[in-house]
């Protein structure tokens, strides 16, 4: 291409982009802590494409990845106040705000990821999504986050004895602090973005997460022992500010809800691929993955956590129904 042709092609492309951007009457700003390309980010972008198509370009979503809009506790608050339109977060950081979310954050409440998906796709999931609304949030969809397991910089954990007295970062929820207590370790609740340097400087010994987060956060570089004890299977939520949602017409609200629903299978497919790729990447980088672990003592240790947190009829009923779901 000649210089002039290249230039005019570039000008035309930017003019087209400007028209597309100008056509968006409403741009919904969506927050996420993960880096670009992570399954949750790609799922929300996909949802945005569906919305744009179905509103003839009137409504768009702009995804702010890598915690550009803040750590999860802050983005939840900002979404409640309508400063941010949407946020994608783990259910964990909602625990102290929305009681129903505690149930799906209990250790070993789900027997498998498939069990979690069945529960969240059904009436229990609907009931919990509805519990967001009195807190000025619209629950749009659940995403999968696999299972969370422990990793640390000190030694391979093959039993509860290895975990004893370790300082482990957890998400900011009382359930996870009590979970670590019950396991004989010491919990350090911290925002996600502070975990890497805290391990690196020895403030904490390790943390816990699923393989894609263990990999994308780079935590495997500073904490190479990863034990697949799978103590938490916590779904993630995509929520919208009620203030932003109420500004949309009933028809547009339905388009948003429907697009969020349709982003779920897309997300799950990306998740499966990413779990595999992340595991391969951390192994190639020298991480040690311990799979030979008896989960029974871990499960048995959780009795006091359930006793302390499952304290109302609503929560007891949810726990029973989850356990009874095949
Ligand atoms: C990741 C979740 C993210 C949490 C993070 C954490 O996707 O929402 O912020 O764990 O541990 O797996 O804080």
Image (cartoon, grey):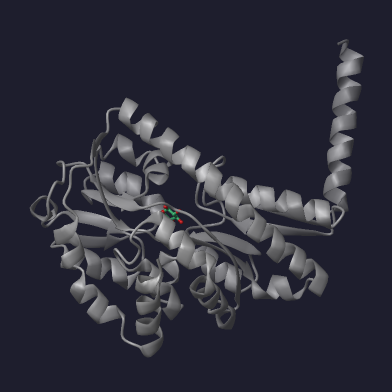
In the figure, is residue 32 to the left or right of 254?
left
Residue 37 % position (x, y) = 56, 40
Q: For the point 35% across and 88% down, which residue is it?
A: 312
Q: Is residue 297 above or below residue 270?
A: below
Q: For the point 82% across and 48% down, which residue is it?
A: 21
**Residue closer to the observer: 318 or 65:** 318
Q: Is residue 247 above or below residue 16?
A: below
Q: Is residue 5 above or below residue 196?
A: above
Q: For the point 60% across and 45% down, which residue is it?
A: 42
**Residue closer to the observer: 222 or 270:** 270
Asked whether residue 235 is in view, the answer is: no
Residue 81 % position (x, y) = 61, 74
In the figure, is residue 313 to the left or right of 290?
right
Q: Is residue 88 above or below residue 197?
A: below
For the N terminus, give its image quadrant. Answer: top right
Taking the view exactly as shown, the residue that stands out farthest to the front is: 326
For the C terminus, give its image quadrant. Answer: bottom left
In the figure, is residue 196 to the left or right of 167?
right
Q: Quadrant of residue 135?
A: bottom right
Taking the view exactly as shown, the residue that stands out farthest to the left is: 161
Q: Quadrant of residue 61?
A: bottom right
Q: For the point 42% across and 43% down, which residue is it?
A: 212
* Quadrant hosting ligand 1: bottom left
């Amino acid at each position: 291409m000649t210089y002039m042709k290249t230039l005019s092609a570039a000008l035309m492309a930017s003019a087209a982009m400007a028209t597309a951007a100008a056509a968006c009457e409403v741009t919904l700003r969506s927050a996420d802590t993960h880096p670009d390309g992570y399954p949750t980010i790609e799922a929300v972008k996909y949802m945005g494409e569906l919305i744009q198509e179905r509103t003839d370009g009137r409504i768009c979503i702009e995804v702010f990845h890598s915690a550009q809009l803040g750590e999860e506790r802050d983005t939840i608050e900002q979404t409640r106040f309508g400063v941010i339109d949407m946020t994608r977060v783990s259910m964990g950081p909602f625990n102290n705000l929305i009681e129903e979310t505690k149930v799906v954050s209990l250790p070993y409440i789900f027997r498998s990821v498939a069990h979690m998906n069945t529960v969240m796709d059904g009436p229990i999931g609907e009931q919990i999504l509805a519990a967001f609304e009195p807190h000025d949030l619209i629950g749009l969809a659940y995403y999968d986050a696999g299972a969370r397991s422990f990793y640390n910089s000190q030694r391979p954990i093959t039993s509860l004895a290895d975990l004893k007295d370790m300082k482990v970062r957890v998400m900011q929820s009382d359930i996870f602090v009590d979970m670590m207590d019950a396991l004989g370790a010491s919990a350090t609740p911290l925002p996600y973005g502070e975990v890497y340097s805290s391990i690196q400087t020895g403030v904490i010994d390790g943390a816990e997460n699923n393989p894609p987060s263990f990999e994308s956060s780079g935590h495997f570089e500073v904490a190479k022992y990863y034990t697949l004890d799978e103590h938490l299977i916590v779904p993630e939520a995509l929520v919208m500010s009620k203030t932003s949602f109420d500004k949309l017409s009933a028809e547009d609200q339905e388009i948003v809800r429907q697009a969020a629903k349709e982003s779920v299978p897309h997300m799950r497919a990306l998740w499966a691929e990413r779990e595999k790729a992340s595991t391969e990447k951390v192994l190639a980088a020298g991480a040690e993955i311990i799979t030979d672990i008896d989960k029974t003592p871990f499960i048995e240790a959780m009795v006091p956590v359930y006793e302390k947190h499952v304290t109302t009829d609503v929560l007891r009923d949810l726990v029973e129904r989850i356990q009874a779901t095949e």
